[in-house]
Amino acid sequence: MQMKATSIKSLYRETKKYIDSNIVVAGWVRTIRDSKAFGFIELNDGTFFKNLQVVFEDEKIDNFKEIAKLPVGSAIIVHGKLVETPGAKQPFEIKADKIEIEGLSQPDYPLQKKRHSFEFLRTIAHLRPRTNTFSAVFRIRSLAAYAIHKFFQDRGFVYVHTPIITGSDAEGAGKMFRVTTLDLDNVPRQEDGSIDYSEDFFGRETNLTVSGQLEGETYAMAFRNIYTFGPTFRAENSNTPRHAAEFWMVEPEMAFADLNDNMEVAEDMLKYIIKYCMENAPEEMEFFNNFVDKGLFDRLNNVVNSDFVRITYTEAIDILLESKEKFEYPVKWGCDLQTEHERYLTEKVFKKPVFVTDYPKDIKAFYMKLNDDNKTVAAMDLLVPGVGEIIGGSQREDRVEVLQQRMKELNLKEEEYWWYVDLRKYGGTRHAGFGLGFERAIMYITGMTNIRDVIPFPRTVNNAEF
Amino acid sequence: MQMKATSIKSLYRETKKYIDSNIVVAGWVRTIRDSKAFGFIELNDGTFFKNLQVVFEDEKIDNFKEIAKLPVGSAIIVHGKLVETPGAKQPFEIKADKIEIEGLSQPDYPLQKKRHSFEFLRTIAHLRPRTNTFSAVFRIRSLAAYAIHKFFQDRGFVYVHTPIITGSDAEGAGKMFRVTTLDLDNVPRQEDGSIDYSEDFFGRETNLTVSGQLEGETYAMAFRNIYTFGPTFRAENSNTPRHAAEFWMVEPEMAFADLNDNMEVAEDMLKYIIKYCMENAPEEMEFFNNFVDKGLFDRLNNVVNSDFVRITYTEAIDILLESKEKFEYPVKWGCDLQTEHERYLTEKVFKKPVFVTDYPKDIKAFYMKLNDDNKTVAAMDLLVPGVGEIIGGSQREDRVEVLQQRMKELNLKEEEYWWYVDLRKYGGTRHAGFGLGFERAIMYITGMTNIRDVIPFPRTVNNAEF
């Protein structure tokens, strides 16, 4: 396949097999330098984080002068012998017999060898994966996505594609994007002047989903264990380093499972993803630990090797009140935990990941199971050092009357959720699930601090370029 | 996890381990029948296609009468001993010591034991995965999705999440859904009366993507081999069994690859997915072959065991012209191939999958590589028996001037594609890729004939329920 070019990854991973062999490699020039009679190219072929050093000599290759002047970023195909280079920085290099130019770059190529700010690189999102940082970020993103699939598939969970375009509003929370084929220039009206959505594509108002959970629950009641993994959307005007309008979410849902089962799976999953990335991209992870976030390995190893703490919200509030710490947002029972509170708990008090459970019902969603105290719900948030909340979940309300009562309190129309209520009528079970914001996880694993830098082409307020 | 209930899948796959042991199983009542002193339940727990037979006796369980009257669909937890049943239809059964009712169903449960039409089941899409057919469909869907990830990840391809909300139009083809936060009741206007999109969330017009290919190409120029796998959208008013407004697409893209490489990967991938489903869900596949599509195994084995044919479009036209077959749509060089032509080629002429390459440029997209004849492009469509086209792809135009010329001819604005053109300026390479409509593949693998029956909650004209 692909001209039988050997991947640079194979050269590093199976070096013995290739040393002193004639090989062909195809990739892009990262840097180039030459003296009169010979030159060096750092070649990256996208299969591996590290480059391959190419040595080319005037005596051996026909087009020496042309190659010596190649602009950075050019694509070339190198034929030659792989030789060991004992004592040198790199373990081996290729001595070129022939170098073909596949595609020239230009002198105005934006990725010249110098440091570029992340802000600048966002403006060339189509080129930034060619840099060290972003090739590492997006390889980790790919591996982490696969780790999630592998974790759940190995455990028999069924992957469900819940709908992106939806007529319902998963939580009554979160501003939504309208999806329409109506002519905005000439919106059709009914006799009373209101918009005639019967003319819209779906014959009704539709939006982009904010969560696949409710639909996911319907499949958990058929397959026992399921997960979703797809894009979700928020039309919130939050121009922060942690908010994007479009992001991916993982949402497992398990029948016959309670809050303890839920925490067990969340803990196992998070540890699994981290380990998978560390084992399958050690060079990239090393790079993040050295150049992006010096404490990264300490933090990740702490997560992987800890038994996560489990405390109730009420206990958490007591700890915060007793701490005498000055918080920007004052603490009292009933308040939502802010990032400062979450980080205090996980970084200062416990120094490892903490599940906080049983939050006041008034700060949580309608579908969470009401506890016997009638004041709290069987919710769980996982807090991790360095970030705060990374996973949110709950056991779901499985009693039909209690669910209906909660919906009434919150002015949700039962007729819009008829199918969700049905699940409690026809063989409902205790069940639980959670959501992991995939980008938050990638930020956590890489140490990158802006969500715009872990999404290939981020969508944020006033930005949908590319 | 989950009350330590053993999955019915484990009972079938590791029978020896469980025979004569006391176990707990948790699932839903598919059927129930009883005589005076004992009864039988067919229990399905969602982990496996087949049911577990539960035998319960008045002498042994306290709540015999209550259990005997359980409505179909109820959720129960059964404690008992697994025993072999030589000579019986099923290999083993569980003799219940105790049956707990987890959640009652109701007498009006729509899935009583009788045949339901697929049309009816679409109206209860939240319950239909509890039927044999749809549990099989959606388990295959999950496995096929995973097979795709595994195929590409094992080969070092990087998974890229291309954007769902887009400011660009990937092909100049395909009607798109508008995404907006503008108040449709009161659309903001500029002074000249035109809509003021600067007030919209992204400060511009945005739509739902029809393809991630163009963005995918940018990542192929960094990682060499990438793939996308995500939802795509068409706002076309096509109310057919093969069209949905929302569907998932797989789009690999490879640098340093030509059309032959492309065909090789497409062929390997399709065979891999089919084999993966057959190996990992033999019971489900058997069911499809017996009850949904009698010729399924013949068809799939033919695909898996064939070397796919490769012919040019011009050869295909010649074959069709010489065939003397009466087609609804007349054949001549330059026409697009219709399903009847495609099926004739693959079913009547070659009796196996056929790649047709090098189509007239006028019926293909602007980004396909122009051949030296100046009339055709390096496109490829894969035709399979029973369906027709299942994969479409091409080598991409990598010469910047030719690309610009093609865009001009088709009235595409270069400034909207500046980043796409950049790829040809800065170290472009020959490259190629293709798209597989995931639902079409699932229909092909299962024999299901309506796309509405392979999507959990399908979105089609006038339908966005659930």
Image (cartoon, coloured by chain):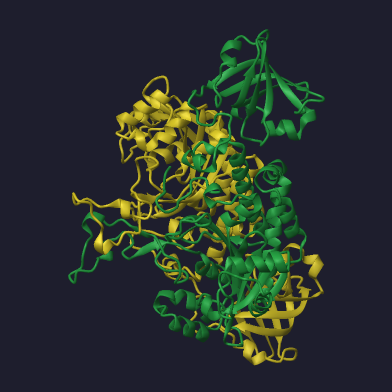
Chain colours: A yellow, B green
> Taking the image as drawn, is residue B466 in sight?
yes
Q: Establish if B257 lies above or below A262.
A: below
* Residue sitting at x 60%, y 84%: B371
Q: Which quarter of the picture shows residue B155?
A: bottom right
Q: Position of residue B82 (x, y in %)?
A: 74, 22
Q: Which quarter of the picture shows residue A170?
A: top left
Give A289 or B464, whichever is nearer the viewer: B464
Give B170 or A128, whichever is nearer the viewer: B170
Q: Position of residue B302 (x, y in %)?
A: 75, 58
Q: Which residue lies most toward the top here?
A: B59
* Residue sitting at x 48%, y 85%: B405
Q: Is residue B429 left or right of residue A363?
A: right
> Taking the image as drawn, is residue A27 in sight?
no
Q: Quadrant of the C terminus of chain A?
A: bottom left
Q: Position of residue A349 (x, y in %)?
A: 46, 35
Give A191 or A453, whichever is nearer the viewer: A191
Q: Is residue B330 left or right of residue B264?
A: left
